[in-house]
Amino acid sequence: MSYRPALRPGAPLLRRDATHLQIGTSPGIVVADRPGLLPLLRLLDGVRDIDRLEAIVRVTVPELEGTAAAALAELRAAGAVVDAGGGDGRHRARARRRVGFDVAPGTDDVAAAARSILAAAGVAQLASPEAELLVIASFGEPARSVYERPALLGIDHLPVVVDEDRVRLGPLVRPGRTPCVGCHDRYRTDWDPAWPVLLHQLGRRPPLPRVTALDPLTSHAAAIEIAAEVLAHLDGQVPRTTGHCLYIGPRHDERTSRLVAFHPRCACDLLSAA
């Protein structure tokens, strides 16, 4: 794919003073001006490749010393110029990854907002069976059978639970590599012995009406956090929900993180050691 130079996305081209130009204002990249540089930068529309630019510059910007490619290489190294032909490397990598959503009634707003953010970030979203990362959104604690299939197939999955006026993210499970939802349940049982009985009842509840105590701002905050976890995973980083549960709410700016380690009585601990 040919190199098609463009100024950093969203960055205006400005004259700072008689001898300097500035690209962008956040905080901006200042470069020393020289003959031909300003008209060269004005030609960078992300459509023309470098060969076409060189041909145009030779005719229209004769005062430029050296080649356009050499001048642009310096600016690219400084971050002022990007390759519109190749796009952002992370953006391209994300587009090749497959993210799925398994959305239960009552979580549509949170999931839709998260999917919109991910789409804007260039993430491809496919049907659940084809996904390598699956976001499983439930209204209240779901029957644990919903996590069995991705675990058996080795599909990384992120539980998202709308729990009254809060949303719980995690733990993000990489089967055989990180603590699973079963670890979460066993640790919860350690401090609340009634949890298995409660969980059994929660998983068998009939579908609830679309009524939630979740504040709309908290819902949007949760969507942002979901998208952030997915993008961190796709970018090869360690998401905050790896080995942790992240709670958003009741207020949109409230965050609580709780550790979920491998539980000694969970089979996934044996898998991770294999």
Image: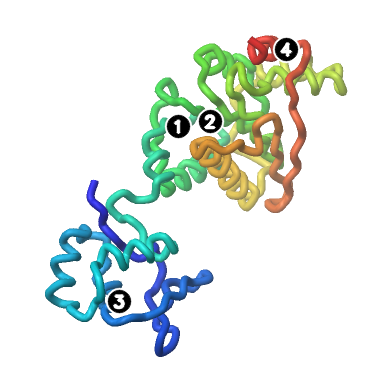
Q: Secondary structure at mark 4?
A: loop
* Residue at position x 50%, y 28% in the image: 133
Q: Classify 97 as above or below 253.
A: above
Label 4 – label 1 distance at C-alpha: 27 Å
Residue 254 relative to residue 170: left or right: right
- Label 1 sits on what residue type? Val
Return the mark for residue 135: 2
From this viewpoint, is residue 156 visible?
yes
Q: Residue furthest front?
A: 66
- What is the spatial separation of the Cα atoms under label 2 and label 4, in whole angstroms? 22 Å
Mark 1 or 3, nearer chain start:
3
Q: Position of residue 117 (x, y in %)?
A: 47, 47
The quarter of the displayed image where residue 259 is located: top right
**Front position among marks 2 and 4:** 4
Pointer 4 or 1: first along the chain: 1
- Kindly identify which numbered label has been placed on residue 37: 3
Q: Name the foreground residue: 220 vs 172.
A: 172
Q: Residue at x 87, y 23 (%)?
A: 191
Residue, x 61% and y 25% (percent of image)? 173
Label 1 – label 3 distance at C-alpha: 43 Å
Q: CB of mark 1 within 8 Å of CB of mark 2?
A: yes
Q: Mark 1 = which residue? A: 99
**Residue kind at label 2, given as amino acid type:** Val
Q: Are the two marked residues, 1 and 3, in contact with CB atoms closer than 8 angstroms? A: no
Q: Is residue 108 visible?
A: no
What separation in Å lies between label 4 and label 3 (alpha carbons)?
Answer: 64 Å
Look at the numbered disc 1 and give the secondary structure of its residue: strand
The circle drawn on residue 266 is: 4
